[in-house]
Image: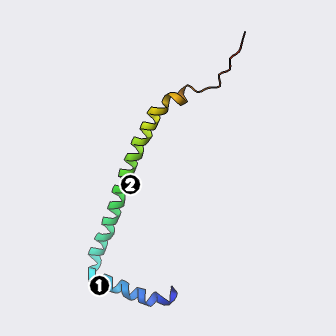
């Protein structure tokens, strides 16, 4: 809330003075690296799932056409 901005600024300053700028930057970078690693892992899993789905259903969609029997 806007009434607590002064308290928030004070907490931020205390946090920064306790940990220091270098360690805070390291925290941020570790968090970003962890998110990137997670996204790579999830993308790899999705790719495997998509390939399996394609393999399982390839024939289903490959030969599906509107085929009408006509007598000549």
Q: SS for tag 1?
A: helix
Work out whether residue 32 or residue 62 is closer to the camera in this orientation and state it: 62
Residue at the (45%, 33%) spot, across then down: 56
Earlier sequence position, callout 1 versus callout 2: 1
Quadrant of the image occupied by residue 16? bottom left
Q: Which mark is residue 25?
A: none
**The C terminus, quarter of image:** top right
Residue at the (49%, 30%) spot, across then down: 58
Question: What is the x, y in percent for residue 49?
Answer: 42, 42
Residue placed furthest toward the right: 72
Question: What is the x, y in percent for residue 37?
Answer: 33, 56
Q: For mark 1, does the 10 Å Cα neighbourhood hold few (<14), some (14 to 19), or many (20 or more) residues?
A: few
Q: SS for tag 2?
A: helix
- Which residue is labeled 2 in the image? 39
Image marks 1 and 2: residues in contact by CB distance under 8 Å: no
Above or below, 30 against 23 in this view is above
Question: What is the x, y in percent for residue 40?
Answer: 36, 52
Viewed as shown, does residue 25 lie left or right of 53? left
- Which residue is labeled 1 in the image? 17
Question: What is the x, y in percent for residue 53?
Answer: 46, 37
Q: For mark 2, does the 10 Å Cα neighbourhood hold few (<14), some (14 to 19), or many (20 or more) residues?
A: few
């Amino acid at each position: 809330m806007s009434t607590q901005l002064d308290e928030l600024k004070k907490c931020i300053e205390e946090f920064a003075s306790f940990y220091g700028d270098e360690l805070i930057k390291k925290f941020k970078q570790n968090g970003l690296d962890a998110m990137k690693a997670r996204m790579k892992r999830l993308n790899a899993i999705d790719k495997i799932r998509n390939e399996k789905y394609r393999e399982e259903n390839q024939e289903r969609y490959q030969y599906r056409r509107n085929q009408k029997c006509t007598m000549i």
